[in-house]
Image: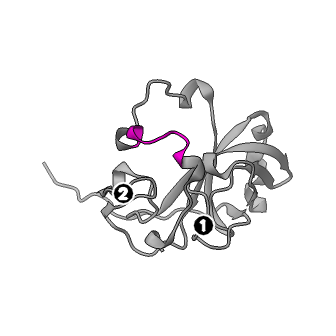
Amino acid sequence: MNHIEPQRTLNLSIIGTITTPHDSLQGMPIQPSGAGNIRGVAEVFPEFSEGLKDLDGFSNIMLIYHLHKVQGYQLIVKPFMDDREHGIFSTRSPKRPSPIGISTVRLVKVEENKIFFEGADMLDETPLLDIKPFMRQFDNRPHAVSGWLDKKNDDLVMRTRSDSRFI
C-alpha cells in the first residue's frame, strides 16, 4: 500500500471584514458572553452577499474568523480564566497553530451585505472566513462537560478581559 503524505496547509478565502469597537487586544472581552451587547458589523464582500439570504430568520449566528493580530503559537498556555497552564487545545487561547476564532453572537439585523450583531469579542477589522447559523437542534449540549473550566465560577467569563499574555 502506498503511503500518501497528508496535506499540511490550505488556503481559505476571506469573505468579508468584521468591524468592532475593539482596537487593541488589551482589555477586550474574551468571549461573546462577556461582551454583552457590544455591537459589531460583519460586512461580506459583494460577491458573497447573495449567500446571506434567510440568515435574518436566526437569533444567533457563528462568526468564524482569522485571529489576524496573533503572532506565533504556544502549545502550553496559561489561559485568561485560570492561573494554571493547560494544553492549547483544552483552551480558547488565541495563540494557536491555526489562528481561527469562532464566536456565537446575537444577530440584530441583516441589511444588504452587512450583518449587525451583539456580543462583539473580536478586534476591529478582523478578516471574516465564514458564517454559520446557530441551530438549537444541533448546537445545544445541555450535558456538556467543560473540563478544568467547570471548577470556575460561571460568571468569571463575564468579568474576564484580555491582557498582554497573548500579544
The vertical placement of 91 against 54, above or below, is below
x and y percentages locating residue 28 in the rendered image: 61, 63
Residue 131 shows in this picture: no
Q: Is residue 159 left or right of residue 99?
A: right
Report, in whole angstroms, how far the alpha carbon at label 1 lies from the one at label 2: 18 Å
Q: Is residue 155 magenta?
A: yes
Residue range in magenta is 149-156
Q: Amino acid at mark 1?
A: Gly
As drawn, the label of residue 83 is 2
Crowding around mark 2 (Cα neighbors within 10 Å: few <14, some 14 to 19, many 20+) is few
Point 50% across, 59% down: residue: 100
Point 37% across, 69% down: residue: 73
Q: Is residue 47 left or right of residue 98?
A: right
Residue 155, image quadrant: top right
Count of labels in the image: 2
The vertical placement of 17 against 156, above or below, is below
Q: Are the two marked residues, 1 and 2, in contact with CB atoms closer than 8 angstroms? A: no
